[in-house]
Image (cartoon, rainbow, N blue to C red):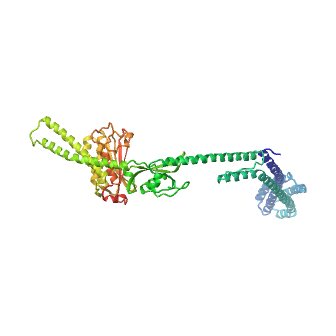
Amino acid sequence: MFRTLRSRLMMGIAPLLAVMVGLGLWAVVMFHSLGGNIDVILRENYASVLAAQNMKEALERMDSAFLFAVGGQEARARDQFRDSRPLFEKNLSIERNNVTLPDEQGMADDLTSHYARYTTLSDQFFAISQSDVAGRTRHYFDLLLPTFNQIKDRADDVLNLNQRNMEEMDRRARTAARLSTRWMIVALVGSTLIATSIVVFLSRSILGPIRSVTNAARAMAGGNLEQVVPVPSRDELGELADAFNVMARRIREFQQAGTARFLRAQKTAQATIDSFPDPVVVVDLTGSVERANPVARRLLGVAPIEGDTVPWNPPDDIGLRLADVLKGHADYKPTGFEHAVTIREGGQERHLLPKVLAIRDEHEGLLGAAVVLADVTRFRLLDQLKSDMVSTVSHELKTPLTSMQMAVHLLLEEIVGPLLPKQVELLLAARQDSDRLLAMVNDLLDLTRIEQGRVRLDLQAVAVADLVSESATRFADQARDAGVTIETEVAPEMHPVLVDKERIAHVFDNLIGNALDHTERGGHIHISAFAENGLVRFEVRDSGEGIAEEHLARIFDRFYRVPGSRSGHGAGLGLAITREIVVAHGGQIDVASTPGRGATFTFTLSSSTNDGSMIGWEGEAS
């Protein structure tokens, strides 16, 4: 009969709406009528009651005036009588104009006639001589007092009549209210029954199909995609059921196609990982292994089951970096061999450089991480061979260089004979070049010894303020000559640091010396130290020419010199040695710079209260 859901809803709601509108209109009319009638009646009765009450009060004052006159207070009596008459007459007029009840008109007429006689007798009373007290007394008790009582009784009759009518109207109002309440209850019960019937009807005809769709949707959410909802009608609910069935069919088709694509993607991903010659491990957010290639299975002992994950306890260095990446930190991509981990295979050591890369979705949500361990065994051996060669060559060069320096020194001292000015000039140039070459050889030897762990660190607890002030003092004269100001700043109450004082002095000398070389006259160098997470962070900041961003990543590489810098001397070994010394102390060094605004070098050292890795540095540096 009803072809649309809207028409069914309208036909279901219309009866209830009609009942509620009719009930509301009936209640409005009834209460308005009852309230209006009661208001009019009570207002009229109240006016009569108030008038009767005021007449009684005025009459009492007029009667008291006669008693004052008998008592000899003539002036007071006349004033009181004169003041009370207007009040009585005003309220008498109100009563005569507000007659609303049967018999009330006769009472008003009696009041008028009795009052007229009372005023006449009053005039006669005051006409009697004041000295005739006996005459006034007889006139009051024989004539005035009986008339007073008649007026008072009639006023009481008016008062009682209106009060009884008010009580009757109150009773009727209560009766009408009780009756209205009963009818309202009946109407509400009736509308409730109608509403219940409508709800039951709508529940069966509307909510039933909706519930079917809901149950089918929940089943699909639980993984059961074989859902078909019956189509009960051709209205909106029928269209909803039909659309749901179409959606379920499409989802089943997509699932089948998606499953095939997913399996193909899984196989492709596994094949890609298996093709890597280096170990590759893919973990989820909990650190459990999802995928691993054969090399990782062999070297690391991880063997994930197809479609499932297995726990993994990686080496400590890898485990710490993996935990940081899974917490949302930056990827771990080291480049130096010192970060490599060593794994034994078949009695041989293999050195693997780990990289931990976060796996994210298209919304940058973290899904897991991939651990790639690049086999750097061969490169590390080559690096070791190179270091050994550099060490051997440097050591072999040092002896003849020293002999050459001694020979040049003897010649310049003219021990073997006098020299011509041109010969002195050439020998001075040779001595300068030999000194520079010997310094380079010494730097190479130091760098090689530090890298190979053949340098023993004499660790001592040194005050931070002493390190900073002594470093600034060593360059005070050079800075004054260059027109550069050196400033120091040390946070109060700093704990001492555990350092090899001679080696750390070399770090400060290199950083401050570079800052002086690249800072123009009028500039400044700021040396500071402050506590940071249990460490002490040192900072050397200058206002010089700065370093371009493309050179920052290589600034600590051996033999690397920034092109076009103001300082043209040196072999590019100073910062490399500086980094190795800081790393040997268990610290880190970094640089930040903006061209034209100076550079800032920072490095960290462990304080004497730090119970971490620095304890192990009492032996050889590693």
Q: Nearer the viewer, residue 428 or 355?
A: 355
**Picture quadrant of residue 533:** bottom left
Residue 252 visible in this rendered orientation of the protein:
yes
Q: Is residue 156 left or right of residue 431?
A: right
Task: Assign the C terminus to one quadrant of the image.
Answer: bottom left
Residue pushed farthest left? 417
Residue 327 visible in the picture:
no
Q: How many marks?
A: 0
The percent coordinates of residue 304 (x first, y second) are 51, 55
The N terminus sits in image quarter: top right
Q: Position of residue 154 (x, y in %)?
A: 87, 59
Q: Is residue 564 left or right of residue 430?
A: right
Q: Quadrant of residue 466?
A: bottom left
- Name the residue nearer the viewer: 309 or 31: 309
Q: Position of residue 45 (x, y in %)?
A: 83, 55
Position of 593 relative to 138 (above/below) = above
**Residue furthest toward the top?**
422
User: Whole-percent x and y of residue 523?
Assistant: 31, 41
Q: Residue furthest front?
A: 346
